[in-house]
């Protein structure tokens, strides 16, 4: 795996080192030892999948508070998404900054999301599918969110939002 630091402290884009031959290719998508060597938490408590029928669907911006704060490793396995994270750790040098990247089935990149980062994405294609490895069990009592269009962050989504859940559309403005 190739670990590429983003502009946000502790967040990484992870690219595959594909070994190819006449059969196709092979690549490691997760290795606890390599994650630890890069200072990342390798815990996997759950693996989740989301499927998005329509281009423009937006999910986010979600996070969980301690003691149930989550790390995530997010990969698009069908179609394409625009994935965004926001550093909401008050003691971080990149506090309130965000990062966005296109993850696609073709580029096979993954995004490592540290604890106390808000996370969300927008489907750029119909039938986009996303796999998440999550480092903590989902705990509804610790779930929080930020509106995807909160002016505090000025996130520029690539296409108009066409589908969003009622809950995601009603998250309150961020109060750092």
Image (cartoon, rainbow, N blue to C red):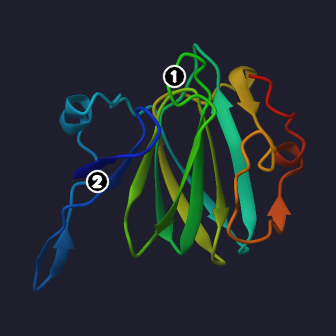
How packed is label 2: few (under 14 Cα within 10 Å), some, or many (20 or more)?
some
Q: Quadrant of residue 130?
A: bottom right
Q: Quadrant of residue 7?
A: top left
Q: Nearer the viewer, residue 6 or 63?
A: 6
What SS does tag 1 mark? loop
Q: List the single residue furthest toward the front.
A: 93
**Residue at figure coordinates x 33%, y 52% from the top left:** 14
**Residue at figure coordinates x 71%, y 28% from the top left:** 143
Q: Is residue 7 left or right of residue 164?
A: left
Which quarter of the image is occupied by the C terminus?
Answer: top right
Residue underneath mark 2: 29
Q: Is 55 located above or below residue 49 in the figure? A: below
Query: Picture coordinates of residue 108 (x, y %)?
Result: 37, 66
What SS does tag 2 mark? loop
Q: Nearer the viewer, residue 84 or 128?
A: 84
Q: List the single residue furthest toward the left.
A: 21
**Residue at figure coordinates x 28%, y 46% from the top left:** 30
Query: Picture coordinates of residue 133 (x, y %)?
Result: 45, 43
Q: Is 45 located above or below residue 51 in the figure? A: above
Q: Is residue 147 left or right of residue 45?
A: right
Residue underneath mark 1: 92
């Amino acid at each position: 795996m190739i670990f590429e630091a983003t502009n946000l402290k502790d967040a990484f884009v992870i690219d595959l080192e594909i070994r190819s031959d006449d059969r196709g290719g092979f690549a490691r998508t997760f290795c606890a030892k390599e994650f630890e060597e890069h200072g990342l938490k390798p815990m996997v408590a759950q693996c989740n999948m989301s499927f998005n029928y329509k281009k423009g669907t937006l999910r986010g911006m979600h996070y969980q508070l301690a003691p149930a704060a989550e790390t995530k490793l997010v990969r698009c396995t069908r179609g394409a998404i625009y994935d965004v994270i926001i550093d909401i750790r008050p003691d971080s040098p990149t506090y309130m900054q965000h990062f966005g990247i296109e993850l696609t089935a073709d580029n096979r990149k993954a995004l490592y999301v540290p604890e106390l980062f808000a996370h969300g994405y927008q489907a750029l294609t119909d039938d986009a599918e996303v796999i998440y490895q999550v480092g903590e069990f989902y705990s509804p009592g610790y779930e929080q969110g930020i509106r995807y269009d909160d002016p505090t962050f000025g996130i520029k989504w690539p296409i108009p939002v066409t589908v969003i859940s009622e809950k995601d559309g009603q998250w309150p403005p961020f109060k750092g």
